[in-house]
Image (cartoon, rainbow, N blue to C red):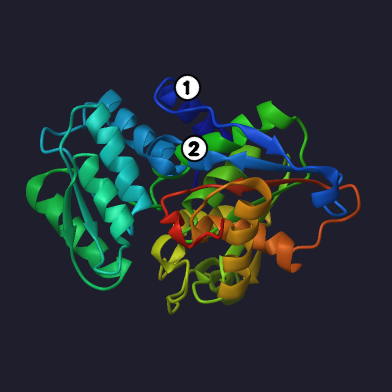
Amino acid sequence: MITRTDVQEAATRIAGHVRTTPVARVEPDLAGPAGALWLKLEFLQHSGSFKARGAFNRLLAAAERGDLPAAGVVTASGGNAGAAVAYAARALRLPAEVYVPTTAPAVKVDKLRQLGATVLRHGSEYAEAYDAAVKRAADTGALFCHAYDQPEICAGQGTLALELLAQVGEVDTVLVAVGGGGLMAGIAAGLDGRARVVAVEPEGASALHAALAAGGPVDVPVAGVAADSLGARRVGGIAYEVAVRAGVRSVLVSDAQIVEARRLLWSSHRLAVEHGTAAAMAALNSGAYRPAAGERLAVLLCGANTDPSDLAG
């Protein structure tokens, strides 16, 4: 479990290592019934996603404890977590190994290598890459960085919530895309009742939705256009506990709705994001989440490690 105090401590720890990302207010004629609609442009973060926050918090906290080994760090990732860990490790002059499934997009694998990480492909799904990474860390003594289910990772991601509140003041609802749930957990803990959190998941990768229905984390099948970033087979234990405690609601969106939201973010706002990120906006565009009149909304646009060539001019 993580608390707002953990998030506040993470914010102090990572200050100066991550960017304060901007917030853009959407024009009233595009905001629908919402009283205000803000887009948090976290895809401008170092390494192209919010995950740099958690990676720095994990590594810097380990350094404070004297637990940062010369063997460096190991992680498993479909791309974004790996890029974040590679970026943080390079900044702290540590070696990094990243295990990815064979389905990881080439654009993300190339970025990992550009950041100086050793990339190892293993298995067709994240779960298989994860098992290999855990074994590697145990064999070498390297620090293992979970993509979404470690307290320091989740608390680091939650610093985004503190930043958002400082930028926009009061907000009623925050929409966030969910895969394994680390970002959602950090956001809900950081907000600590100051706003409701709505989790948005693809129909083909709905680990949190299934967990809330089952009363605990369960394995789900993973498929779809956003599976590379939101394709966790099982939601994290921390995420589930925080979601229940905070009353987080989950809504589902289809692949077609995600693709359309991504296209609209480009055509209407000139924002190029990955499909997983567009899922949060798809909840609004599709009506999966319908704001009340005058509701103050923030949509977290959390990653941009994508190939923009399929976006229409």
Nearest the eye: 231 or 313 = 313
Give the percent coordinates (x, y) of residue 57.
38, 33
Identify the residue at image location x=52%, y=59%.
311
Image mark for residue 233: none
Quadrant (top left/top right/bottom left/bottom right) for the C terminus: bottom right
Relative side of 92 to 176, left or right? left
Q: Is residue 96 left or right of residue 253?
A: left
Residue displayed at 62% across by 66% down: 260
Helix, strand or loop status at disc 1: helix
Residue 240 can be seen, yes or no: yes
> On residue 12, which mark appears?
1
Density class for disc 1 (Cα within 10 Å; few <14, some 14-19, many ≥20) is few
The CA distance from mark 2 to mark 1 is 20 Å
Give the class, few, some or many, for how many residues have Cα within 10 Å of label 2's Cα (few <14, many ≥20): some
Instruction: Say left or right for 257 vs 134.
Output: right
Q: Nearer the viewer, residue 227 or 206?
A: 227
Residue type (three-letter) at the residue carrying disc 1: Thr
Foreground tag (2 vs 1): 2
Which element carries disc 2, helix, strand or loop?
A: helix
Q: Quadrant of residue 58?
A: top left
Q: Quadrant of residue 292?
A: bottom right
Q: Position of residue 300 (x, y in %)?
A: 61, 47
Task: Give the x, y percent position of residue 79.
Answer: 33, 54
Callout 2, which amino acid?
Leu
Q: Residue at x 76, y 39 (%)?
A: 171
Q: Which residue is mark 2?
A: 44
31 to the left or right of 254: right
The extreme left residue here reads 139
Instruction: From the top left corner, tell me how far across and down residue 129 is, in percent.
Output: 24, 64
Residue at the spot 31% in from the left edge and 45% down from the top edge: 83
